[in-house]
Amino acid sequence: MYNTYQPSLTISTDENNSILFTVPELADYLGIGRNRAYDLLRNNIIKGFRIGNTWKVSKIAVDQYILQNSGLL
């Protein structure tokens, strides 16, 4: 007999229903240029990953970067 239980997963998202940012979205969110956003990702200052040629970065990673660099942590 097969187990038919499938746990549900609820993820909180921001107002645009996205938990991952692209580089243009990251730049807009931080109020910086795209080149600076690419630099932050390439230098591993903000943790991101690539899917093909497209960078993706979690909102959680961006928020952690903001907290660490704001002196609030």
Image (cartoon, helix red, strand yellow):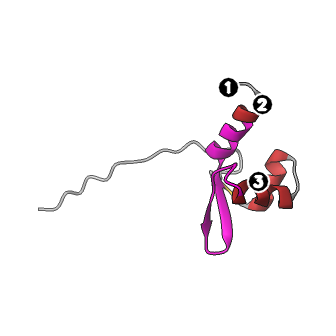
Please report the bounds of the magenta region as a residue range: 43-66
Residue located beneath label 3 in the image: 26
Residue beneath the point at 52% across and 45% down: 11
Residue located beneath label 2 in the image: 70
Q: Nearer the viewer, residue 11 or 56?
A: 56
Q: Give the image quarter of residue 54.
A: bottom right
Give amino acid for label 3: Leu
Q: Nearer the viewer, residue 63 or 16?
A: 63
Q: Residue furthest bottom?
A: 52
* Mark 2 residue element: helix
Tag 2 or tag 3, which sits nearer the N-term?
3
Give amino acid for label 2: Ser
Residue beneath the point at 83% across and 52% down: 28
- The numbered mark at residue 73 is 1
Q: Is residue 44 above or below residue 1?
A: above
C-beta proximity under 8 Å, tags 2 and 1: yes
Residue beneath the point at 65% across and 60% down: 56
* Mark 3 residue element: helix
Question: Badge 1 local density, few (<14 within 10 Å), some, or many (20+)?
Answer: few
Image location of residue 4, percent across then percent down: 23, 57
Distance between mark 1 and mark 3 Cα atoms: 21 Å
